[in-house]
Image (tube, rainbow, N blue to C red):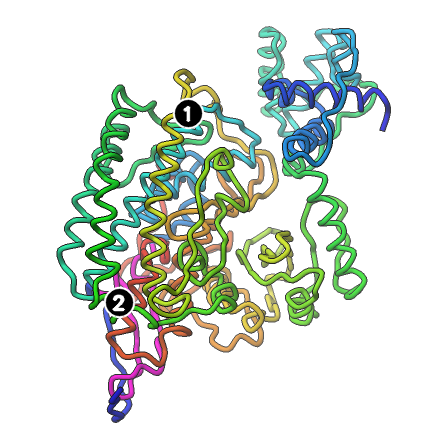
Amino acid sequence: MGVVHGEEMVLNIGPQHPATHGVLRLQVRTDGEVVSQITPYMGYLHRCFEKHSENVTYEQVIPFTDRCDYLSSMSMNFGYVVAMEKLMDIKVNNRVEHIRVVMAELQRIASHLLCTGVFGLDLGAFTPFLWALRDRERILDLFELTCGARLLYNYMWVGGLSHDIPTGFVESTFEFLDYFEPKVDELENILAHNKILVERSADIGVMPKDVAISYGVTGPNLRASGVKWDLRKNDPYSIYDKFDFDVPIGEGKKGTVGDCWDRFYVRIIEIRESVKIIRQALASMPKDGDVHQSLPKKLRPPKGSIYARTETPRGDLGYYIESDGSPIPYRVKMRSPAFTALSVLDEIGAGWLLSDVLAILGSLDIVLGEIDR
Amino acid sequence: MSADKEKLIAELVNKGLDGDMDSVNACEDKIIRGKAKAMIMKVKKGTIERPPKPELAANEKIDSKTPESLSKDEMISYLVNKGLDGDMDTVNVCEDKIVRGKAKAMIMKVKKGTLERPEMPILDSPVSSGEPLEDNTQDDDKDTFQKIKKLIYDKFPNSIIENEEGDYIQIKPDEWNELAVWLKSEPSLLFDSLQCQMGIDIGDDNLESRYNLHSMELDHYIEIRIAVPRSDPKIPSVEQVWRIADWFERETYDMLGIEYTGHRDLRRILLPDDWEGWPLRKDYQVQETYHGIVVPKMKEGWE
């Protein structure tokens, strides 16, 4: 490859730049076109989530979690209620668990659709992005049907849900899945085996296993590096142990294990696995059960602390909650998966061409709302 | 453990396996409940056999520790004491409406100071009050935790601060870096992943840095806590042991002002470099203006 070496230059990408997926500034040192160092500057979206949480009641934290990762609000709600229910030793009934799993997996599909679509967009493919958004729109319709909101749901509550699913939801979801499954193949065909995309992403930005673990990278990014680690399987929460699904890992089909293409492709397979889970959950959902059955009158957890993790579309989401026995949290810490994913950017991005850095950033699937909190 | 308790556990396990988890959850004794739950999990996994159903008369189910045998007045004082100690759940599950109402009224009065706290009625044996987390902790996890704690103690006897309660390890900051390197490399521990690092203002002029470690290989967890005085909050950095600690420590520095010595790039991460103060400390006062812009104050009683 004919790389021209020139004078060293410092270049700012962002804060306002479409390729940074939000308000993020990358300070890049370049030698000609080769990047030698990437320093991310964030905090532009910092909304003091943790400080706010110390001033509101436990129930009032849930809408804030929505706004942290606005592309997978259901999963953020889910993580928080799982942590709180562990802390307070609340058991919810089977219907609630089933609805939660269906919502979380629909959310995973919506989030992965956006990620894969935008990854194509970053590399110059415009059409698949529109296809992905078209199908994501139908999932948002389902959410709107359920709780009235399309983006920020405040749907899962500690001990239950805000609403039961409406009449016809199960049928509409099945109908959507029947429509959607062939579309996944379509998306895969147009993107994953596209020569331009393969050239731009295979063998680029390889993240070895040990680097991924040391940097705390989780979720699809970690699995793409060949580590079979999924909290839904390895440390099942809710009722995930009841369902039959696979955990896809990167195999280096087009290049090396852990390259950008693997990180992108793992998400496509995960969409299919989520479809499997939703089908099982809808089929086995109990007909009766009150979604408000286990709602405590007042959320007042006993003194103590808990660290609980769940698997969001972006990886392990951890909540560390410290309670002093009052209705207001003493301390809430969110361990956000995108935060750790972004920290690895300098390690795997340095040494590549400037245009590759944007491909690597796109393949990590970060959401700035969650990084800055 | 007495034979009575074992019988009770066996009965709960059988109930739970038959789908009646409510009975298990309703068991007052946390230790018995925890053991029963652990056993149910094991039976489901297939590692142990289902225990035989003990033949019990119906009334024997009630553990001697539960206050069913108390008179109404005694019951009220018992509930009031429980409620004042923060265990309102016990009060709320009381089935007798009158007793419950009276107990709640009395709690309010005691809190206001118009009434003296009643004496705790003497039960056959005191009701255990463990850490709330212990309910979910299975026996296996506890064993592993004790084993890990012992291993650390053998290697770094001067670092551990003894704490009987809780499922975390409290250590001194001095040898933390060496300890961290050892935790990561010791073949029987292999803590290769730092799940979460957070800082907290625990009061009493102390700040605490907490580390949730996990071993991908061996699949076990520990939590390590290091407390430092607010006047001189210095903790050795583990940024070069687990690379993610780089950003985690920067965030804790940003929010609580804990200084991680040996960190190669310790600066604010979420707030601007010239921000004043440490927001997540409990005594934080927000600055009046920032570059001439008025900083809005947080409202009291945020709605």
Question: Predominant secondary structure in magenta?
Answer: strand
* Image location of residue B209, percent across then percent down: 58, 59
Q: Secondary structure at mark 2?
A: helix
* Residue B201 seen from this side: yes
Residue B101 in the magenta stretch? The answer is: no
Is A34 contained in the magenta span? yes
Q: Mark 1, residues whose alpha carbon is within 10 Å: few (<14), some, or many (≥20)?
A: few
User: Which range is magenta?
Assistant: A19-46
Q: What is the three-letter code of the residue carrying label 2?
A: Val
Q: Residue at x 42, y 34 (%)?
A: A59
Locate residue B258, reporting x and y percent. Answer: 54, 65
Q: Earlier in the sequence, mark 1 or mark 2?
A: 2
Residue occupied by mark 1: A284
Residue at image coords 48%, 43%:
A232
Amino acid type, label 1: Ser
Quadrant housing residue A24: bottom left
What is the tally of numbered marks visible in this picture? 2
Q: Give the distance between the C-alpha atoms of the residues marked 1 and 2, in whole angstroms.
A: 40 Å
Q: Is residue B210 visible?
A: no
Q: Which mark is residue A198?
A: 2
